[in-house]
């Protein structure tokens, strides 16, 4: 077994076509950003899945804590008035 | 998602409550994600299953690699190259999924090289003729797809997502294999004979890919409880047989099983007994190619070590130079 340092982990984001967001595709190992882009091409766009890619060192990603899920996200659940379907509009009124 | 996302192994006093909450999430079909609390046993179970799955994809390249330069046409060669590149990709998706559970890539590979971790026994059979390449695509990838479609709804999120991607890509593997078989089976008598010979050798090992009978599968109970799997080995094996026999009929080839009959009552094919002694012999290391496969894998890793080290050294040098400028 090699004792050398493992190549760092990167997260890969792919834009599937112009006009859409980059979306998380997966992760990979690469020694630097340049090779991470190359490897992302080979690993995540073998069938024309993308026109642009981002790579970000996994260690630099800041994520919310699962334990904070309720306090962060649950308050939105009771705020149904933020959705258009909450409001009653008479049937004869159109284009609204 | 990321390797640093090692789930905290909370030694809380109310471990039982945490486990109950975990099971409730599983039962409610909520996927378990890397940073969620999970029982240590679940974490270890998933690492074992995902890494063995990854190793199978990885080792699966070896029997086919030998045939790239021997492919009969450029079309077949391009297809085989693409298939093998896919296997490498599939291994990479799965190794990444295993890493979300707190393993390192190096440790996972070390477990393969030391023989501690297993991979699918099917890859310990030799690939003797071009018809074997067709049969592998048709039967081995076909069986893998049946297994993997069932795993697309597995409880661990990163594993399920890898499966969805793999299933999408693997369909072409089976179809290119069947196309090879169609050409051979409808070709010269010698070609048809070659196709039949390959089917004779690969049929039973393909059925063994689904694992032991449910009654002899010690991990099944907990795998069902955690919704890691949702169909039993025998159910999936039966599905594969039912799908495959009409395809063999189309080719005008017959599977090497004198007991195979259509059962009107059950609506399934009945098939003969599987040689489980052979299965366990190959699992335990005494298949025809176990040693060759591991030797090839180890030397590829060791011979490539200098490249990995040089790339890392180069990256560090560039980084240092950039910092000095700044």
Image (cartoon, rainbow, N blue to C red):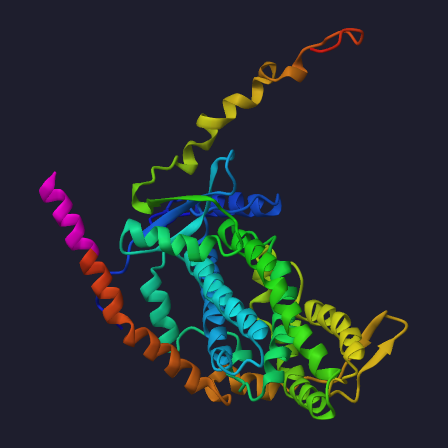
Q: Which secondary structure dominates the residues rendered in magenta?
A: helix
Residue B9 visible within the image: no
Work out whether residue B147 or residue B78 is closer to the camera in this orientation and state it: B78
Hey, which quadrant is residue B231 in on the image? bottom right
Q: Where is residue B206, by image quadrant? A: bottom right
| Relative vertical location of residue B157 with respect to residue B293 in this rendering, above or below | above
Residue furthest out toward the left: B324
Instruction: Write the start and end of the magenta stretch as one range.
Output: B315-326
Q: Nearer the viewer, residue A6 or B310?
A: B310
Q: Residue at x 39, y 75 (%)?
A: B116
Q: How many marks?
A: 0
**Extreme residue toward the front, this view:** B74
The x and y percentages for residue A7 are 28, 58
Q: Name the residue at 74% across, 73% down.
A: B244
Left or right of residue B155, residue B116 in this image: left
Estimate the x, y position of residue B75 in percent, counting from the top left: 58, 72
Pick whichever, B210 or B302, lies toward us.
Answer: B302
Work out whether residue B225 can be spotted.
yes
Lateral position of residue B194 relative to residue B122, left or right: right
- Asked whether A88 falls inside the magenta stretch, the response is no
Looking at the image, residue A65 lies above or below residue B201: above
Q: Residue at x 36, y 54 (%)?
A: A38
Quarter of the image with the C terminus of chain B is top left
- Whole-percent x and y of residue B252? 79, 83
Q: Nearer the viewer, residue B115 or B197?
A: B197
Which x, y percent locates residue B8? Answer: 36, 47
**Relative side of A37 to B120, left or right:** left
Above or below A14: residue A90: above
Residue sitting at 39 percent across and 35 percent down?
A64
């Amino acid at each position: 077994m090699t004792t050398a340092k493992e190549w760092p982990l990167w997260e890969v984001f792919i834009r599937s076509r112009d006009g859409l967001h980059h979306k998380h595709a997966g992760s990979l190992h690469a020694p630097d950003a340049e090779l991470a882009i190359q490897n992302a091409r080979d690993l995540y766009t073998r069938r024309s899945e993308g026109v642009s890619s981002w790579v970000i060192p996994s260690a630099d990603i800041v994520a919310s804590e699962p334990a904070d899920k309720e306090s962060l996200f649950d308050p939105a659940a009771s705020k149904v008035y933020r959705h258009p379907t909450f409001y009653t509009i008479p049937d004869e009124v159109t284009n609204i | 998602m990321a390797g640093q996302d090692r789930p905290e192994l909370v030694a809380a006093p109310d471990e039982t409550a945490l486990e109950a909450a975990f099971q409730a999430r599983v039962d409610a079909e909520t996927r378990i994600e890397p940073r969620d609390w999970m029982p240590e046993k679940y974490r270890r179970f998933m690492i074992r299953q995902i890494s063995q799955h990854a190793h199978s994809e990885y080792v699966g390249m070896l029997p086919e690699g030998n045939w790239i330069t021997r492919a009969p046409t450029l079309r077949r060669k391009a297809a085989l190259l693409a298939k093998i590149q896919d296997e490498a990709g599939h291994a990479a998706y799965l190794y990444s999924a295993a890493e979300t559970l707190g393993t390192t890539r190096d440790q996972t590979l070390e477990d393969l090289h030391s023989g501690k971790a297993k991979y699918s026994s099917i890859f310990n059979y030799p690939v003797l003729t071009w018809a074997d390449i067709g049969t592998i695509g048709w039967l081995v990838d076909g069986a893998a797809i049946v297994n993997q479609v069932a795993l697309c709804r597995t409880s661990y999120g990163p594993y399920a997502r890898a499966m969805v991607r793999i299933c999408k890509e693997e369909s072409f593997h089976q179809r290119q294999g069947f196309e090879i078989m169609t050409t051979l089976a409808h070709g010269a008598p010698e070609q048809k004979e070659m196709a039949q010979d390959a089917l004779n050798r690969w049929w039973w090992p393909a059925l063994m890919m689904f694992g032991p009978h449910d009654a002899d599968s010690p991990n099944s109970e907990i795998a069902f409880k955690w919704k890691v799997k949702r169909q039993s080995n025998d159910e999936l094996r039966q599905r594969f047989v039912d799908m495959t026999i009409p395809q063999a009929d189309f080719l005008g080839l017959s599977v090497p099983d004198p007991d195979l009959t259509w059962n009107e009552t059950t609506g399934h094919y009945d098939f003969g007994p599987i040689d489980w002694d052979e299965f366990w012999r190959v699992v335990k290391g005494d298949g025809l190619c176990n040693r060759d496969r591991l030797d090839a894998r180890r030397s590829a890793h060791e011979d490539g070590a200098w490249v990995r080290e040089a790339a890392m050294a180069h990256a560090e040098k560039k980084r240092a130079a950039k910092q000095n400028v700044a």
